[in-house]
Amino acid sequence: EVQLLESGGGLVQPGGSLRLSCAASGFTFSTYAMSWVRQGPGKGLEWVSTLSPRDDTTYYAHSVKGRFTISRDNSRNTLNLQMDKLRAEDTAVYYCAKAKSRGFILGGTIFDSWGPGTLVTVSS
Amino acid sequence: DIQMTQSPSTLSASVGDRVTITCRASQRISTWLAWYQQKPGKPPKLLIYKASSLETGVPSRFSGSGSGTEFTLTISSLLPDDFATYYCQEYDSSWTFGQGTKVEIK
């Protein structure tokens, strides 16, 4: 059974940094693309970032590009999101999600399994 | 960037109703379109992918159609468990979500 569990959320001041992690199990982590998606309080879903499984190609939403860095540790089955220069508008529940199929194609990769999320609050 | 627009934003319906939600893409995305269901405090659940393919385990009362720029999600006969928020998502050039449609009890 696929399991994803996010951690690392919390309260941080504007301009600060936070590192989220997602522990994965139940599948061959190294062969699947992974993503982060967030949801602000009372708001809709917003895609944040995606990481391909092999060449580690990264993709970012315009709203986080240059501030957030997605990475993976295949030896530990862990997906990470380093968040720097945080802003109030980054306040959200952050979900990690696994691609439905092995490999990666831009234009054709959808995400079928999600963790329960971790809350990040950016406030002074 | 592709913009995804869902309508309506809120839909009031009764158990047993047939419900249709529309999603429009700002440019053609072939059939690279997914639908998710989300309940409060829970992560999204994939219902439909490639515009019309039913995810494993999803009841057959859910169906999707469309291609290019116009897509629909239909629930043939609404059950109490179906009251939730529904999102479309394109995955043609990125992974942009629509703003969501809340299906509430009439």
Image (cartoon, rainbow, N blue to C red):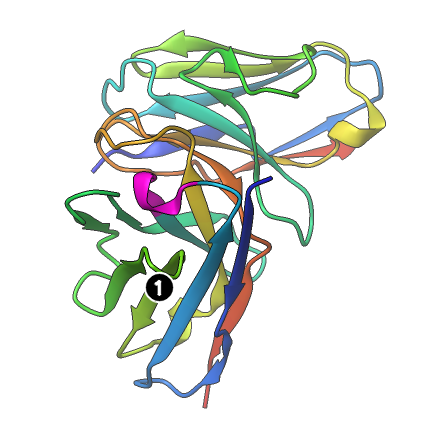
For image coordinates 54% across by 32% down, the residue present is B36
Q: Chain of mark 1?
A: A
Relative height, residue A116 to residue B80 (above, below): below
Q: Is residue A39 visible?
A: no
Location of the N terminus of chain B by quadrant is: top left
Report the front residue among B105 and A102.
Answer: A102
- Which of the 4 image quarters holds residue B49? top left
Q: Magenta residues?
A: A28-34
List the residue tagged with mark 1: A80
For image coordinates 24% across by 26% down, the residue present is A107
- Which of the 4 image quarters holds residue B69? top left
Q: Where is residue B42 shown, x and y percent of the image? A: 65, 49
Q: Where is residue A63 shown, x and y percent of the image? A: 26, 59
Relative height, residue B54 to residue A84 (above, below): above
Q: Please tell me how crowded label 1 is: few (under 14), some (14-19), or many (20+) other residues with Cα within 10 Å.
A: many
- In the rendered image, the residue lying farthest to the front is A75
A31 magenta-colored: yes
Secondary structure at numbered mark 1: strand
Q: Is residue B41 visible?
A: yes
Report the front residue among A6 and B105.
Answer: A6
The amino acid pointed to by label 1 is: Asn
- In the rendered image, the residue lying farthest to the bottom is A124
